[in-house]
Amino acid sequence: MAKKVLVVAEVRDGELRNVSFEAIAAGKTIADGGEVVGVLLGDNVSSLAESLIHFGADRVVQVNDAQLKTYTTDAYQQALLQVFDIEDPEAIVLGHTAIGKDVAPRLAMKLNAGLISDAVSVEVEGGEAVFTRPIYSGKAFEKKKVKEGIIFATIRPNNIAALNQDANRTGDVATITAEIKDLRTTIRDVIRKATGGVDLSEANVVVAGGRGVKSQEGFGPLQELADLLGGAVGASRGACDAEYCDYGLQIGQTGKVVTPDLYFAIGISGAIQHLAGMSNSKVIVAINKDPEAPIFEMADYGIVGDLFEIVPILTEELKKS
Ligand code: FAD
């Protein structure tokens, strides 16, 4: 049955994150011939509306407000609830990102809706949207659908392919003025640690190191490999706990979830909590000196050997190609 679906886009540093386009693709499926409305929140985001339409939104509603420049739970919640009130959608989709994970459950509660979180795919069966989501740290998948009320879902980045961009698509862009008041938190300044440049959650190639990397300096060759492949460096919790790298790089159950096309697990044993964050990667390459390391059960390609010898050889060979 055709539905009206609201897709909340995600903006960072004035740019749309890829998950916004993936969420539109999910929205299209859920809409089942109905309308997909992109929702843009920010300080001055009008220039981004067109992209949402090019990637499949039928129209866009935006809220431009200085209080939405940087994400805060209160401001986003207030603005989105007012947009939902005006639009009265049958379904709402957000990315399963730090923002989505924070605001979606609160919104769902306010709307008295159930929340299907972290969906990796969605399809329509018998006229109903059916979502697939991982359970037991990615060991199994379950299918879920909403029986009554608003369909509310967050989608895992890098799993649902965005639609092809069509620069000829057109659609209305409307501005809503939301009343945002009594904020408990305001962001005065954002200070970011310098990172390799590629966003780990959205990277197509991830070069992850574990405790086997043995030091902060040991991550240098991994960064070189990542740079060469246009990817990002990640880490196991073992490496973060040993202070070889920042916790912002941690992948796994209590870290980031990544789904790149290519994942290197270097000096990582393959604990279940680590697998929870990367097992959906399309191709996994493991480098470990222990042939019994559990990561080899998950890997598509395994290299048994000393990472300090193998990574530089790999990098040199890739430089030639
Ligand atoms: P290790 O298990 O110590 O493995 C190091 C590997 O490096 C070994 O396999 C070894 O053979 C190999 N190695 C050593 N030297 C070399 C060399 N020179 N060349 C090649 N290989 C070498 N972990 C996560 O990663 N992410 C999480 O989000 C996470 N959440 C957790 C949540 C909970 C509640 C708990 C209890 C644990 C969590 N953990 C998480 C920790 C997890 O259980 C493991 O302890 C951790 O993943 C181990 O990290 P590691 O593989 O780097 O280290």
Image (cartoon, helix red, strand yellow):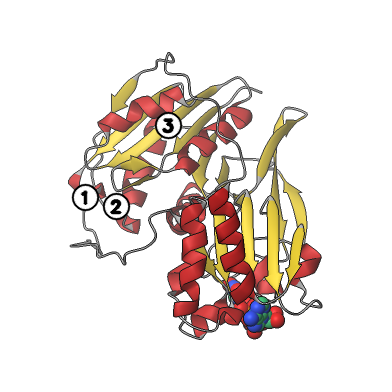
Q: How many marks?
A: 3
Separation of residues labelled 1 and 3 (CA atoms)? 20 Å
Looking at the image, is mark 3 or mark 2 nearer the viewer?
3
Q: Are marks 2 and 1 in contact (CB under 8 Å)?
A: yes
Instruction: Where is residue 72? Give x, y as percent.
Output: 31, 57
Q: Quadrant of the N terminus?
A: top right
* Residue that extends furthest to the front in the rendered view of this protein: 320
Give the structural element (helix, strand or loop) at label 3.
Answer: strand
Q: Residues within 10 Å of mark 3 (few under 14, many from 20)?
A: many
Q: Is residue 114 left or right of residue 21?
A: right
Q: Is residue 30 left or right of residue 178?
A: right
Q: Nearer the viewer, residue 320 or 15?
A: 320
Q: Nearer the viewer, residue 286 or 269?
A: 286
Q: Nearer the viewer, residue 222 or 59?
A: 222
Give the structural element (helix, strand or loop) at label 2.
Answer: helix
Q: Residue at x 59, y 40 (%)?
A: 149
Instruction: Where is residue 279? Give x, y as percent.
Output: 69, 60
Query: Would you place residue 227 above or below residue 270 in this image?
Result: above
Task: Give ligand 1's quarter of the image.
Answer: bottom right
Find disc 3 in the rendering and name its residue. Answer: 38
Q: Earlier in the sequence, mark 2 or mark 1?
A: 1
Residue 218 visible to an observer of this rendering: yes
Query: Would you place residue 102 above or below residue 27 in this image?
Result: below
**What residue type is disc 2 on?**
Ala
Find disc 1 in the rendering and name its residue. Answer: 67
Find disc 2 in the rendering and name its residue. Answer: 75
**What residue type is disc 3 on?**
Gly
